[in-house]
Amino acid sequence: MNSRHMVTIFEGAITDYHRIDDVDQTFHGSEEGSSEWSETLYHKCWIDTVQWHLEDIIRDPHIDPMQALAIKRRIDESNQNRTDKVEQLDSLIVNYLSPPEPNVDARINTESPGWAIDRLSILCLKIYHMNEEANRLDADASHRKKCSDKLDVLMFQMKYLSTAIDQLFEDVSCGRRIIKTYQQMKMYNDDSLNPVLYGLKKES
């Protein structure tokens, strides 16, 4: 359980998606026999990758309004699935690390490991697509240079985020840092908590 392993899985999911490059393609999962940890990481990045392309599509200024609404619904559902996967990752991390009784001076992290891993998945997507732009044959040299410079920044961020995740795991394992799962409690997807949705139920 280290950042390099995570990045390898994320890169595999991104590459697999782009073999067909269609937001409606069927999700088949990673290799047979992979662990629950690896499969959850793969599925998490697949969700992120599909959503990345949905976000591209919905920004078409000429998109049909009904199609845009349908995609917005898909993005909302994707965000919920993304959150669910992050919380699943946090549960797996706690079980795997079996954190000891924290030290008396142990500190609390501002985010759970799962959300740090979420950022790593998105960063892998940014790197993949920025690399595409930096090598676009139909773009001018100025565009490619700007994207190449941005790619350098993203790679720098990858190095630091990866190090931070590895250090967090080490600190949790040694009792130097307390691990907490931050449940998002999203209310707008719940028809018992969203006043617009439960208002409709009352009307019917």
Image (cartoon, helix red, strand yellow):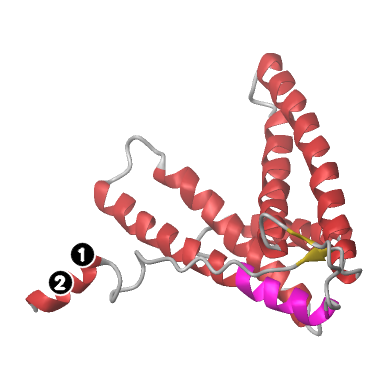
Q: Are marks 1 and 2 in contact (CB under 8 Å)?
A: yes
User: What residue is drawn where x is 78% and y is 39%?
Assistant: 157
Q: Measured from the top left, where is residue 127 in percent x and y?
A: 73, 41
Q: Is residue 167 above or below residue 146?
A: below
Prevailing secondary structure class for the magenta stretch in the rendered image: helix
Mark 1 sits on what residue? 196
Give the image location of residue 52, x and y in percent: 55, 50
Query: What's drawn in magenta, residue-wise?
Result: 86-98
Residue 24 falls left or right of residue 182? left
> Dot 2: what SS?
helix
Residue 73 appears in which quarter of the rendering? bottom left
Residue 92 colored in magenta in the image: yes
Label 2 sits on residue:
200
The secondary structure type at the circle numbered 1 is helix
User: What amino acid is labelled 1 in the image?
Assistant: Val
Indicate the amino acid at tag 2.
Leu
The residue at 28%/76% (across/down) is 192
Mark 1 vs mark 2, CA separation in Å: 6 Å
Q: Is 60 left or right of 16, judged from the image as shown?
A: left
Looking at the image, which is closer to me, 161 or 126? 161
Q: Quadrant of the C terminus?
A: bottom left
Tell whether position 69 is magenta.
no
Q: Position of residue 182 (x, y in %)?
A: 59, 66
